Image (tube, rainbow, N blue to C red):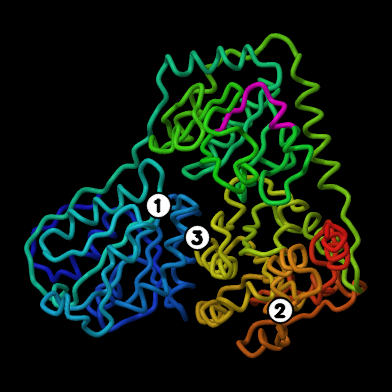
Amino acid sequence: MHKPSSRMRAASQVLVDALEGHGLRHAFGVPGESYLPVLDALADSRIDFVVCRHESGAAFMAEAAGKLTGLPGLCFVTRGPGMTNASAGVHVAQQDSTPMILISGQISRGFRHREAFQEIDPRAVFGTMAKLVIEIDDAARIPEFVARAVRVATQGRPGPVVLTLPDDMLDEQVMVEDVPAFEPLEIAPGRSEMARLGALIAAAERPFVIVGGSRWNERAVAALVRFAECFDIPVSASFRRQMLFPNDHAAYAGDLGPGANPKLVQRVKDADLVLAFGARLSELPTQGYSLIPIPNPGVAFVHVHAGVEELGRVIQPTLAINATPAAFTAALDDLEPPADTRRRAWRESAREDYLAWSEPLPQVPGPVQMSTIMHWLRQNLPANTVMCSGAGNFSIWLHRFYRHPGFGTQLAPVSGTMGYGFPAAIAAARLNPERTALCFAGDGDFLMTGQELATAMQYGLAPKVFVIDNGTYGTIRMHQEREFPGRVFGTDLRNPDFAAYARSFGADGFTIADDRDAVAVMEAAFASKNAAIIHVKLDTEAISPGTTISALRAKARDRG
């Protein structure tokens, strides 16, 4: 336990001591003169500070660290543009329910409300994204506010907290005691709630589980697997939460996101009991809020969530349970499983639908076949590989055809934020250098944060990156062809040689321009101990696994 200190210290040292005392060890940032005393205090701390090349990259890395550890990832930036550049990562942390603390320097207290150099109002900027925004004016209150920030970021539905530090406050000397390290609060379900849940499950012929959200761990996932096995209930993952249930398990039915398996969507509609464990059930997993009627679901609906404010926020549940995943899944072990096997066919057919959707790897136009790449990855990646992605049509190949073997193997933004995947892979490599960190990125997606390759090289990290280059902002082009067929404007991209780009940083660079070279290239890239970019030259016509540009255009024109 961190021992309280009552010695005289600079405010900057009090801050770093407080962060250390709560067990926070992973920080990412871009330096700024507005918080130089904090940087100096970090130099002698146990906190691992990774200097990045852009604040958005630093914020994405901090958010990824929060996902991987369950503790707030730290992001340090300077005032004004440093804060606004980091806002994309704060938004990811909000929508993905990830614990994160953004700590920023700020203008001097006496300069406020004059539009001083780089002045912004952090409460106005972050008030709709962060769970809490505090400007620390009094150095003596730093331990109080850090303790509050850590709790707010982690408890209930996790999310981002923003702390700003006026630069004239950081040099103040104060004598203040540290706050003892926090212990995460686990909320357990009540006995009456579990009894009602048991009765609803017992009465159901076609129950279905949707798992999602944050605050999960390996033990909670294992308990959910036992529950699915004992009760013969199929389980689907919410959007970009596939790691919350082993995809090779007989009860796994696929994921609910954009372009979901139509049979999976219909199965949820056919269920007579829908069980949402940890998921918010927002726009994408509910297929544009069409999957389950709102506000009355028209079917028995159980919603379990750590944030009480999420229960009944959109869909009114038959049974609402305010509980964290670890405590709730532990309580599932006490439910009495059915004596018969009447649900087995329901569960088995859900699995068959998933395999029929995810097993055949489609052929696409052009000399490069994504099916070859996906097949090789499924056969050759270590089970503990951390698969990272940003946003774009390229990610459909992952969601539909890659199989996450277990917890802690996925970093992907529920918020649909481009540029996230590569910084996330760098964070994964920094936190777990013994594991393979793999980023799947599109051409437009990668170049939003591609400069962070310099960060990877500076720290001797070796993430592997597939840059799927189809010469267009693919998702937008797909929608453009649907709405304005043949009128291509603002979506074409002229790209660099990504393999040469990698080599210019000192990383390894490879190119797949012909399917016959794919396996040899991947074997070489993954055998290397260095960071590597694999430039995949995909035909623009291959806009997604299920359709082509020509087919989209023809269908749109036929529609009139």
Which one is earlier in the sequence, the residue at label 3 or at label 1?
Answer: 3
Q: In the image, is residue 271 part of the stretch drawn in magenta?
A: yes
Compared across the picture, whether 93 is left or right of 451 comes to: left
Quarter assignment of residue 397: bottom right
Residue linked to disc 3:
64
**Of residues 16 and 434, which is closer to you in this image?**
16
Residue linked to disc 2:
489
Q: Which three-letter amino acid code belongs to the residue tagged 2?
A: Phe
Q: Identify the residue shown where x is 39% and y is 78%.
A: 30
Q: CA–CA distance between discs 3 and 1? A: 12 Å
**Of tags 1 and 2, which is closer to the observer?**
2
Q: Identify the residue shown where x is 66% and y is 12%.
A: 338
**Residue 533 in view (yes/no):** yes
**Of tags 3 and 2, which is closer to the observer?**
2
Q: Is residue 176 above or below residue 350?
A: below
Where does the image place residue 335, in percent across and percent down from the top left? 55, 16
Where does the image place residue 82, in percent across and percent down from the top left? 36, 77
Compared across the picture, whether 468 is left or right of 109 comes to: right
Which one is earlier in the sequence, the residue at label 1 or at label 2?
Answer: 1
Residue linked to disc 1:
159
Q: In the image, is residue 251 part of the stretch drawn in magenta?
A: no
Q: Is residue 261 above or below residue 298?
A: below
Q: CA–CA distance between discs 3 and 2? A: 34 Å
Which one is earlier in the sequence, the residue at label 3 or at label 2?
Answer: 3
Where does the image place residue 418, in percent across and percent down from the top left? 58, 68
| Element type where label 3 sits in the image | helix
Q: Which three-letter amino acid code belongs to the residue tagged 3?
A: Ala
Q: Which residues are magenta?
A: 267-276
